[in-house]
Amino acid sequence: MEEIKIHLTEKEIPEQWYNIQADLPRPLPPMMSPVTKKPATPPELTPLFPEALIMQEVSKERWIDIPEELRDLIRQNRPTPLYRARSLEKLLDTPAKIYYKYEGVNASGSHKLNTALAQAWYNKQEDVKRLATETGAGQWGSALSMACAILNMKCTVYMVKVSYQQKPYRKSLMQLFGAEVFASPTNRTNAGRSILAENPDSLGSLGIAISEAVEDAATHDDTKYTLGSVLNHVLMHQTLIGLEAKKQLEKAGDYPDIVIGCVGGGSNFGGIANPFLMDKLQGLRKNLRVIAVEPAACPSLTKGVYAYDYGDSTGLGPIAKMYTLGHTFMPAGIHAGGLRYHGMSPIVSMLYNEKIIEAVSYLQNPVFEAAVMFARSESIVPAPESAHAIRAAIDEALKAKAAGEKKVILFNLSGHGHFDMAAYDNYLSGNLVDFAYPTEKVHEALSHLPKI
Ligand SMILES: *Cc1c(COP(=O)(O)O)cnc(C)c1O
């Protein structure tokens, strides 16, 4: 009998994170200061981040030790299972093998806990009392709230107003874990007040909420800022996913031909893909295909440009070289809230620019169609974000069928969709509207890029 779930023991949780900066073809372009427009110096970042994380951000060491005490905390929710999608394979009648790593098994419901716990732990070592952050769809805020509860720290979350209204129970979950949650834009910060002065009915954006959380941290001594995606150290913390998946596939006697992840800021994608990309970059797996999947409503990789841009909306935060739709980008209210970000991780951006990885975009309806097929065959309700990866995995499995090829496909199921029933309701009642971001708007927003 072949297994459906491939498990690891707690002892098999990785002891080190993988840092892809050691294997990139070129060094990453430096992050720039929003004030000087020159490479940001560590003292400019210390009001926002603890030193240990700033060091990780720029480190070129291939392997970074996970502190024993942190590993002990990680054990509560890891390892996560790797599934073989036998029912989905049967439904598709494909010769391809489909595997997925399921990151929705912790209470916050996504992969984001992997970095939330690490970031909170390093902050606590440097005597930080409170963490401020933004959340789009609510998963990052939930993960950080949970991490702060575990480490007995305070947590302040600026939640994008449209999500605050669409997903009230995400707010309740954060409060349950002890966080204070505000609908952004708020009146608590200059950034929020300036947006409200222009448009009192603003439904917010991730970029605006980031500005608010950054300002909160920069103006309070006991408080630091945390970001749930995009940054190099965040992607590194997420490599637990891919490193575990590698061991699990080894147990199953397989290695993927194709690795797939959805991309918002790029962290779950980097988490699953980077440990496999290590083999490709080192020349061991030259034919490995790695696919980043994004919504057509927020197509940073497939329609954006590779340029220096602000990470937030009001130009307070650091400037990074990345694929961007422009920091003034206002996304349509699609349901995959976690994928509504104007930029992309500098690491993922470089991998795409160097043609080491591929990217595709999908409209909402085909994504939800895939989500429903998956739920009915695999008995897991996927997050709308994760369903983008499912769509691409299904399409690759169907291509393999047409070509009669026995491909091994691995995708990351980044989270569950238990808080996304309004979105499913919308889809099932036929009311989900497809939205592709118009190219003219990309050109308009790109006229506001900072001059570096
Ligand atoms: C936040 C989130 C994403 C997108 O963020 P990345 O940093 O690109 O991973 C994807 N899936 C889920 C379930 C999320 O919560």
Image: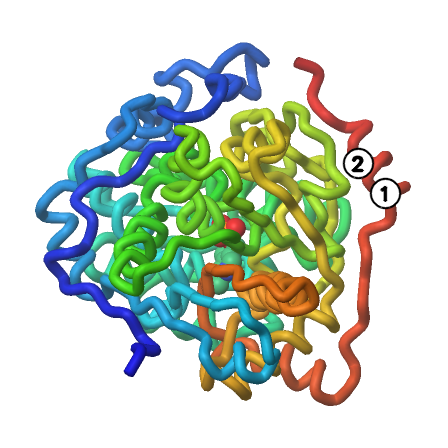
Residue furthest toward the right? 440
For the rendered model, the colour scheme is: rainbow
What's under tag 1, amino acid-wise? Lys
What's under tag 2, amino acid-wise? Ala
Pointer 2 local density, CA inside 10 Å: few below 14, some 14–19, many at least 20: some
Quarter of the image that includes the C terminus: top right
Residue 77 position within the rendered picture, expressed as x and y whole percent measured from the top left: 23, 65
> Would you say the beta carbon of the disc 2 residue lies within 8 angstroms of ligand 1?
no
Q: Residue at x 28, y 70 (%)?
A: 6
Q: Which of the labelled discs sits on residue 34, or is there none? A: none
Pointer 2 residue: 445
Element assignment for label 2: helix
Residue 425 position within the rendered picture, expressed as x and y whole percent measured from the top left: 66, 86
Question: Within the image, what quadrant is residue 225 found in?
Answer: top left
Q: Residue at x 75, y 58 (%)?
A: 332
Q: Is residue 448 above or below residue 298?
A: above
Are circles 1 and 2 on residues that touch, CB within 8 Å?
yes
Q: Is residue 40 above or below residue 248?
A: above
- In screen coordinates, is 80 left or right of 214? left
Pointer 1 residue: 441
- In screen coordinates, is 245 left or right of 195? left
Q: Residue at x 50, y 44 (%)?
A: 288
Q: In this rendering, does residue 450 appear at all?
A: yes
Residue 418 position within the rendered picture, expressed as x and y whole percent measured from the top left: 48, 79
User: Which residue is nearer to you in this view: 414 or 215?
Assistant: 414
Q: In this rendering, does residue 226 appear at all?
A: no
Element assignment for label 1: helix
Quarter of the image that includes the N terminus: bottom left
User: Which residue is nearer to you in this view: 443 or 90?
Assistant: 90
